[in-house]
Amino acid sequence: MDKEMYLSLYRHSLAHIMAKAVMELYGKDTQIAIGPQIDDGCYYDFVLTQPVKEEDFPAIEERMREIIKRREDWTRKEVTRDEALEIFAGQKFKQELIRDLPADETITVYYTGEDFVDLCRGPHVENSQELMNAAYKIKSVSGAYWRGDEHRDRMTRIYLYAFPDKNALKEHLKLVQEALERDHKKLGAQLELFMFDETAPGMPYWLPRGWRMYQELLKYSRAIQDRHGYTEIAAPLVNNKKLWLISGHWAHYINNMFMVPGVSGFFKADDEIPGILESLAEDAPEKTVQMQAKTALYNREELDTMAAKPMNCPNAMMTYKRTVHSYKELPIRYSEYDVLHRKEKSGQMNGLFRVQEFRQDDDHTFVMESQIEQEIADIISIADEIYGTFGVTYRAELSTRPEDFMGDIEVWNRAEAALKKILDNKYGEGGYEINEGDGAFYGPKIDLQIKDALGREWQCGTIQLDFQLPHNFGLTYQAQDGSMQMPVVIHRAIYGSLERFIGIIIENYKGAFPFWLSPYQVGIVPIRTEHNEYAAEIADLLAQRGVRAETDYSDSNMKEKIKRFKNYKDPYIIVLGDKERDERTVSINLRGSNKQLQGVPLERFLEMCETMNREHSLNLIENV
RNA sequence: GCUGGAAUAGCGCAGUCGGUAGCGCAACUGAUUCGUAAUCAGUAGGUCGGGGGUUCAAGUCCCCCUUCCAGCUCCA
């Protein structure tokens, strides 16, 4: 039995044990629903007569232990539908599940001892004693709905961590703790990278330190894309409804767009708007404002409604469409880092991982069908380079034609074949996942998932073929034979959203970024104020060579200065005293340890910094 | 959107039975002039997320709202 099967077998079994324990503790009126396994254990859904709180966890765990010790046999039994309904009389969820089973399905039930029975396909352990070594712990309790439908029964879901033995559980709990410590929301505040305010939910304020990093990411992306023939554009952030009607966003995406409403029926010219406060002061006078003709809010027709763009595509289409194009010009690559807005339902935001305002390292490439393969190979080589620089691995997933596809099925087939060929070449057949029918309605796509330092996966990059927008916008190019043809558009992003990517790398590096990416790369600590002059000289030399340094010229003691820069996780902290000044050297305190490099010649130090910047080094140079 | 939790000084937190808010760090002032992660002393800092209600009295109790967090929206 492979490890996965093994895990599955007794996570499943433990779910039944938990259900049995809860039944025993909370009484026979407890309704039990389903108990599937998940990544780190399993859960079970109940309707209980009283709430479960954290202080109740030990009692449940203890009862589970006791049940396991009873060494009860697990007996499998095949039953008819009527027998099953009889067995689960009073259990409404089980009744529903049984009724929903296909007529020809074999119904099996499992007895755990004499007194507990659950509807289940199995397989399970044969006797509870096989679970003696299993390590488990109740993780949490949360609300859920029967069949995920908020209109149906509200249930209590109890999560269980479940592992083969104590060590595996301990390892996992360590990982959970580690993830908690790496939380980018915490580190973002500590490192002064970004903040949020309730006046702009889901829209980050980028603080000086965070914005430096952001700019470095952009700089790096631009440098690579320049080499690959990309040309950057910028386009309107707020566009008229007319544009969204053409692109299809008005039909498909309107609920995710921030509107600048058309005002007819809202304010009219010469309307008097009372109750406008002059300021937020308590005694601020109220005044009445009169809408004047020709002002921003005056009498807009419905068609004048504007919306902030949730995607760059329509503007890229317009940019292409401005003039005629020859096949000789293709591919045309318009990259774009504009600000996007997507309205999310409340409760869907999560730090930088899911925001309402962000930028992408976006690009729309216009190609002939014959160029798709080569262009995508080039995009993948860019992804290799960028992800490689961050020291993360990634895997590709191909999503193919969905049922509600648009366009010509022959074009789809050719496009999917082309994508498969590229992926086969690159990762070998079967070296990537295929999600049948998961593509966008306008074209198939390749998603790139990166794996972080804790083994968690994140979807960052995406490469999507689009046959639909070129059609909607009536895009053409003139082919060699003089005929007008429609280009294919490739949408792609490598970081994905810069915001999300930064959130991921904060957690990946635990805030200790590679030198080239650090907000400040060198913290300069003059020991006494009489060393400030030498410090200023070095600060100037570093600035001249494009190295970001911060200097503490205050007269506080050096330990405090070092501590402050350590908290910011500056990669190098250089300490300057009599010795360094007289010998024209620096003493480097390395990040992540108390290791020091004493008496490094100034020239050598500058060189170390420049090398790491030039090479986008992942690791800090730790010896001279 | 739904379920549950949270919001008190810049940050991390305490605040009991409803009686007009406190600690640590940071900040500021002064002293100290220091060799690798917290020198000493003093000072200042609050509409207790917003609005409404109950009460002689609300950080505390009730209602509404906002934001954030953990989940759900993964079908034996």
Image (spheres, coloured by chain):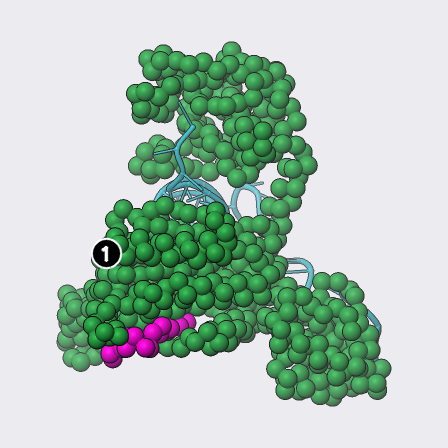
- Residue A515 quadrant: bottom right
Q: Is residue A167 left or right of residue A315?
A: right
Q: Is residue A27 above or below residue A315?
A: above
User: Label 1 is placed on what type of residue?
Assistant: Gly
- Residue A295 quadrant: bottom left
| Chain given the colour cyan | B
The residue drawn where x is 41% and y is 32% is A155
| Stretch in magenta | A320-339
Residue A222 image point, x, y percent: 48, 75
Residue A187 image point, x, y percent: 58, 60
Asked if residue A507 is among those painted magenta in the image, a careful observer would answer no
Q: Chain of mark 1?
A: A
| Chain given the colour green | A
The residue drawn where x is 42% and y is 55% is A421
Question: Residue A507: in sight, yes or no?
Answer: no
Q: Is residue A568 left or right of residue A406?
A: right
Q: Which residue is mark 1?
A: A407
The residue drawn where x is 56% and y is 14% is A73
Q: Nearer the viewer, residue A607 or A87?
A: A607
Q: Quadrant of the C terminus of chain A?
A: bottom right
The residue drawn where x is 71% and y is 88% is A537
Please tell me whether mark 1 sits on a helix, a strand or a loop. loop
Residue A249 image point, x, y percent: 26, 61
Q: Nearer the viewer, residue A342 or A379?
A: A379
Q: Nearer the viewer, residue A284 or A201?
A: A201
